[in-house]
Image (cartoon, helix red, strand yellow):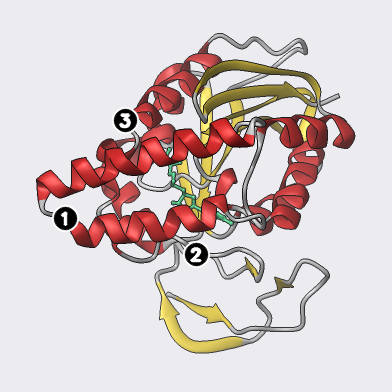
Amino acid sequence: MIFQSCRLPTDNLGLNYPSRPCPTLLPSTYTTMTTSQAEQLFSGLIGAEYDMLRVICPAAAEVSHRVGRRVAGWQPAYPVAGPLQAFEIGCGTGITTLALLSSRVDLIVHAVDNEPTMLDQARVHLRDWLESGRLSIEHTDALAGLRNLPSHSLDLVASGYAIHNFLQDYRRAVLAEILRVLKPGGLFVNGDRYGLDDTLEHTRLTQQEVRHWFKGFGELGRLDLLESWVVHLFSDESPDHIMRLGDSLRLMEDLGFQSIAVDYRDGVNTLLAALAP
Ligand SMILES: C[S@@+](CC[C@H](N)C(=O)[O-])C[C@H]1O[C@@H](n2cnc3c(N)ncnc32)[C@H](O)[C@@H]1O
């Protein structure tokens, strides 16, 4: 067991360093570094019953599989000795993690998430992979986890439906860190909710999506979950968070990502890949 960190003086993105212990004890598998701009949007009902994602977004499972397939088909353009080292951002209950681990045998995944409710489920779902030594899971937020890694140390950074939850400045900082930690030629692959640049069409699709939720959760008698997901959607759609595709591509280009490509798009559900220079 270790001590949970207290809130300490922060840098410009609010990184709290764990030098002063608080009385709350956490399991030793939990790390102690967090970034204050990292929100925890999955701590309530939607995190506890995340498997209900199939009701609100059946397309997410397809995109997660595609993240795995993209990784399966990737060959680094540089010589590799030993297994590929991957970092997964926001593993949640392990849906995309499983797609990654199943994609190829020469892959080791270090996954992070800042929500214990989700990680508890991941540890159950992915128990065999944890025991195999090909997976480690850390309770920390994406930015803190990335900042903990040496430069040019990873072959691959992957994520599924996590990055769209970030605040704009936090997301920019995370993308910059991804570039720093990837080896030259390393792969970034993200299957996620990228808003349409056509804002009218985006609103129409969102309204259609919400109607579908009312129907699905209504039939199941789960108005509690409906409420939680609608509240969450307000966060996704807010100017502070919304991740539109065009803005994202421009940002990645500005930061220095190369070979940026949209490999798949179904409404907002998108698979995007890029290389580090
Ligand atoms: C929609 S879920 C997706 C989970 C999983 N990747 C999947 O494919 O199903 C988003 C996950 O990102 C996590 N998350 C959100 N913000 C985070 C942050 N700043 N750092 C780490 N994880 C974060 C949430 O806790 C949640 O588990």
Up the image or down, 97 lies above or below 15; here it is above
Residue identified by numbered label 3: 58
Residue in the image at 77% along x and 13% along y: 78
Residue in the image at 41% along x and 48% along y: 92
- Cα distance in 3D space between marks 1 and 2: 22 Å
N-terminal of the pair, mark 1 or mark 3, is: 3
Q: Are marks 1 and 3 in contact (CB under 8 Å)?
A: no
Q: Amino acid at mark 1?
A: Arg
| Residue 79 visible in the shown view | yes
x and y percentages locating residue 271 in the rendered image:
56, 23
Name the side, left or right, on which 63 lies relative to 36. Answer: left
Up the image or down, 53 lies above or below 85; here it is below
Question: How many other residues sit within 10 Å of disc 3, few (<14), some (14-19) or many (≥20)?
Answer: few
Quarter residue 87 falls in: top right
Up the image or down, 222 lies above or below 267; here it is below
Tag 3 secondary structure: helix
Quarter residue 10 falls in: bottom right
- Cα distance in 3D space between marks 1 and 3: 17 Å
Asked if the residue at label 3 sits under 8 Å from ligand 1, the reply is no
x and y percentages locating residue 195 in the rendered image:
59, 36
| Residue 148 visible in the shown view | no
Question: How many other residues sit within 10 Å of disc 1, few (<14), some (14-19) or many (≥20)?
Answer: few
Q: Amino acid at mark 3?
A: Pro
Residue in the image at 73% along x and 35% along y: 248
Asked if the residue at label 2 sits under 8 Å from ligand 1, the reply is yes
Question: How many other residues sit within 10 Å of disc 2, few (<14), some (14-19) or many (≥20)?
Answer: some
Residue identified by numbered label 2: 40
